[in-house]
């Protein structure tokens, strides 16, 4: 379980949400409180550096926002982030510095660290994406089970074989720093991918992928060399 703690998955200096995340031991505990936190941090923003886009949506003056995107609050868009044509941001969202949100990418109730890239046809719901995470075209972070039941994380290693009751009906994915997800992959609800791991295109991912791993076709998991 230690490897799944917030401070082991993320370098917290790479997000405006650092102090908020430090209040939690495990990242899925963060999800129900994101919206309220965004509202609180909006109150503290330097209004000389951020401007009001629309109700409860604040963006850095150095960000780039397409007029053909849709953004609802509460949302914060940090320095030099780019919101491209056709992006759909539904609120309860933090977009980190130098992050790219592209065409037909939909986001709700999520924290994106600095330098995240979600540039094409992505769905990100009830999720956290770490520093320099990249998700390829068509990647879906599914956040709701087909039976609508609460999400259970299955955690297994040499010492432990646990089922973690999250108490959450909606929980997408936790992607740690420097994770790469190949095009048209689907991450099932409650998926956690640890630092520096890669997922091949067209993968269906469930459960926990450890640090420095590559998930290849047919769910073959190997160590990075």
Image (cartoon, helix red, strand yellow):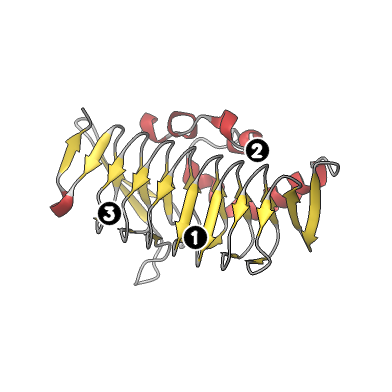
Q: Is residue 141 left or right of residue 115?
A: left
Looking at the image, which residue sits at the far bottom? Answer: 147
Q: Is residue 135 left or right of residue 125?
A: left
Residue 168 is at least partly visible in this image: no
- Image location of residue 156, percent across then percent down: 24, 40
The residue identified by callout 2 is 16
User: Marks 3 and 2, how far apart in space?
Assistant: 29 Å
Screen quadrant of the N terminus: top left
Q: Which mark is residue 125?
A: 1
- First of labels 3, 2 by sequence position: 2
Q: Secondary structure at mark 3?
A: strand
Q: Secondary structure at mark 1?
A: strand
- First of labels 1, 2 by sequence position: 2
Along the line of sight, the residue nearer the viewer: 25 or 180:
180
- Image location of residue 222, percent across then percent down: 17, 37
The part of the image, by quadrant, that contains residue 172 is: bottom left
The residue identified by callout 3 is 205
The part of the image, by quadrant, that contains residue 8 is: top left
Along the line of sight, the residue nearer the viewer: 144 or 154:
144
Along the line of sight, the residue nearer the viewer: 159 or 213:
213
Mark 3 burial class by Cα count in 10 Å: few <14, some 14-19, many 20+: many
Residue at 31% x, 33% y is 211
């Amino acid at each position: 379980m230690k490897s799944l703690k917030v401070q082991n998955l993320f370098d917290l200096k790479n997000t405006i949400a650092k102090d908020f995340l430090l209040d939690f031991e495990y990242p899925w505990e963060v999800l129900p409180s994101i919206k309220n936190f965004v509202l609180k941090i909006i109150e503290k923003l330097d209004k000389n550096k951020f401007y009001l886009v629309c109700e409860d949506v604040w963006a850095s003056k150095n960000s780039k926002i397409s007029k053909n995107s849709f953004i609802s609050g509460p949302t914060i868009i940090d320095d030099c982030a780019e919101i491209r044509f056709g992006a759909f941001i539904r609120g309860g969202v933090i977009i980190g510095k130098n992050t790219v949100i592209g065409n037909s990418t939909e986001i709700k109730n999520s924290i994106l660290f600095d330098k995240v890239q979600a540039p094409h046809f992505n769905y990100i719901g009830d999720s956290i994406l770490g520093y320099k995470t990249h998700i390829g075209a068509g990647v879906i972070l599914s956040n709701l089970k087909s039976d609508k039941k609460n999400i259970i994380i299955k955690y297994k290693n040499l010492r432990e074989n646990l089922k973690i009751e999250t108490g959450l009906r909606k929980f997408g994915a936790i992607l740690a720093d420097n994770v790469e997800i190949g095009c048209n992959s689907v991450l099932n609800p409650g998926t956690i991918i640890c630092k520096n791991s890669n997922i091949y295109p067209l993968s269906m991912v469930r459960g926990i992928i450890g640090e420095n791993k590559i998930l290849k076709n047919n769910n073959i998991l190997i160590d990075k060399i």
